[in-house]
Amino acid sequence: MNETAAAKRIDALRQQIRRHDHLYYVENAPEIADEQYDGLLRELTDLETAFPQLRTPDSPTQRVGGQPLEGFAHVRHAVPMLSIDNTYSAAELRDFDARVKKALEDEPYQYVVDPKIDGVAVSLRYENGVFVLGATRGDGETGDDITQNLKTIRSIPLKLDETAWPRILEVRGEVFWPRRDFEAFNEQRLAAGEAPFANPRNATAGTLKQLDPRELAKRKLTFQAHGVGEIEPAPAGVRTHTELFALLRDWGIPTSPHARQCRTIDEVIAFVDEWDARRRTLEYDTDGLVVKIERFDQRKDLGTTSKAPKWCMAYKYAAEQAQTRLLSVDFQVGKLGTITPVANLDPVQLAGTTVKRATLHNFDRVRELDLHVGDLVTVQKAGEIIPQVMEVDLAQRPARAHPVRPPTKCPECSGEVMQDEGGVYLRCINPACPAQLVERLRFFCGRDQMDIEAAGGAVVEALTQGGLVRSFADVYRLPARRDELITLPVGVNARTGSPISLGEKRTDKLLAGIEASKQCPLARVLAALGIRHVGVTTAEFLADHFGTIDALMAADEAALQEVEGIGPEVAAALCEWFQSATGQKAIADLKSVGVNMTQPPSRRLLGGAGGNAGPFAGKTVVITGTLEKYSRSEAERLVKDHGGKATSSVSKKTDYLVAGASPGSKLDKARTLGVAVLTEQEFDRLLNA
């Protein structure tokens, strides 16, 4: 096939694929099977491989990038993504309607009502019909650039259909994980011996922040539009939300098939009542409806507050409650020894799921409820996700019900327990407690700590139960036990009931992750150790200040409090941990297996060591807007490495504001306060001075 013929066939294939995407995701009326669709995509891929000069960024083959991202740049929204005021009562909806009526001076108006998807809000920007930028909501003014990840979502068109779209079109909507696909993915995780995701909303948020778009592409997320941002020029003759969304559908953008026009607030409230039952049948979670004024000119007249539009209101259904019997109470032990009471319930249907367990938070809450085993309790889902016990029906208490008492010994190891001084938590203080070990190891291997790939919760639990790991250092002794790892049971096949082993491929992936983690900087190690009050930021401050673990362990409380962000409570916790036999053994063992215990030298520390102080030594710097050369996190790291402190807000203590494109209100505030403003080029010159 010559280039002319290939170009013709490529164009035809792209049109077919876009048409089938539209039928599947917008019209919900697919015409071909997945195998046929995949065949079209394979043919297009083969042709573009043979004729790479014909490949274009908006081709369906370009949804998934070839390499993981290094990080997410920050982008400023052309039109802020405001929040929405909400209510739980019909009376407040009527109050909202009264305000609208008064503001519009009795001019006729009507509403459009849409289900409120419990997903992750994003903004899609199209220029000349081509998808060029996708961003998270962020703080409403600035979000993260997740364009490459959003490209993997097949319901998001890379090129708009039809014609006559605006030169610039920003579409706002929700990314969500359809329930059936979420459940199928969880089954795969269980079959692989990995912990299932807790719920679609949180899993979607985590998925969108994956740095490897190839991983995101496997998860079958989808998108639905609910609003717009910048449109230039505005479509001629389009005056209402319904008219505009009909155009969005024509252009290939998925919109809600459930939106309804309501002429009066009475019709809105009738829809609210009707939808309470229907919402359970959707493929996504929803906790309410969004009520909006139809006409755009009236929305403009009504305006906005600093946080929310005055022309819309979210009606949220009250969290569903149900009554059931408390059968027993379990005590769970966390990585820091915290003992949490968990209610075991007579199974009950709640918000579309069967609830068997619910959190009781802590023993103060148990005492407030005067909770007895056998009680008839009211259970509610907090945010429609986490079940919790709300109240007890004392009139229905059985005669032989006995009160729930805090344990006098650790339920896992029978070790001593102690109440936090001035706090509400009961803790096991035995450092050898096996339950704490599992939780500490899960935390140690986590992404923000040692970031050991393939060391998921189920794998860690299997390692401890199998006796292969009894300490942090044992993780690094696993390469010598490769054969045992390969046959290690890490789960059970949900269909056959047979055990699932770790296997060669996952074993090698785990061992590679373990080896790579040895080179983590000291800050990561400190964050992974699970020392009370020491999170990622505190660990960075400590590691940058002391440089080595030996210097840190030798510091007394006074020396520790010289470090930024370290107060008396944190200093005391650090000294207690490093002076304990458990802490000293943990550090000695990690050293012995080759884990790095130093922090890469920070230029801000070199001034006292005979070198030159960094250009930002002792300075507080804020980064705003979009930089061409660096992501915001990279720029902030450079500030720290060159002696400065990077913060997120401008104040009188700010020394420099580095302003990229679309800097927003921070630039205005900096000028008002007289803060020195640097361009990206000036920032670069200082770094290289």
Image (cartoon, rainbow, N blue to C red):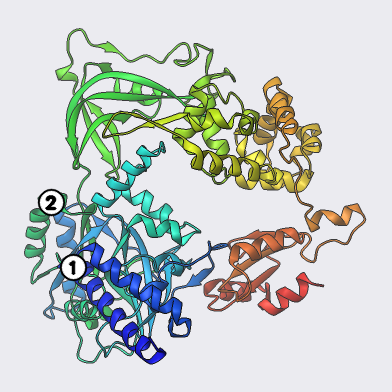
Residue 581: quadrant of the picture? top right
Badge 1 crowding class, 10 Å Cα cut-off, few under 14, some 14 to 19, many 20 or more, is few
Q: Is residue 450 visible?
A: no
Q: Residue 659, image x and y in percent?
A: 61, 75
**Residue 308 percent across, percent down from the top left:** 33, 66
**Percent x, y of residue 42:** 35, 70
Q: Residue at x 33, y 90 (%)?
A: 233
Q: How many marks?
A: 2
Marks 2 and 1, how far apart in space?
34 Å
Q: Residue furthest right?
A: 610
The label nearer to you, 2 versus 1, is: 1
The residue that appears at 57% across and 26% down in the rendered structure is: 469
Q: Is residue 322 visible?
A: yes
> Which residue, given by chain and number where applicable, does mark 1 sit on?
32
Residue lying at the far front of the rendered structure: 1
Could you tell me if the residues under marks 2 and 1 are in contact, i.e. CB atoms within 8 Å?
no
List x then y, in percent, for residue 4. Answer: 38, 92
Q: Amino acid at mark 2?
A: Asp
Mark 2 closeness class: few <14, some 14–19, many ≥20 residues within 10 Å: some
**Which one is in front, 505 or 430?**
505
> In the picture, which quadrant includes the C terminus?
bottom right
Residue occupying the point 76% across, 64% down: 616
- Disc 1, SS: loop
Q: Nearer the viewer, residue 236 or 163?
A: 163
Q: Is residue 609 above or below residue 480?
A: below
Q: Mark on residue 202?
A: none
What residue type is disc 1 on? Ile
Q: Which residue is mark 2?
A: 276
Mark closest to the chain's N terminus, 2 or 1: 1
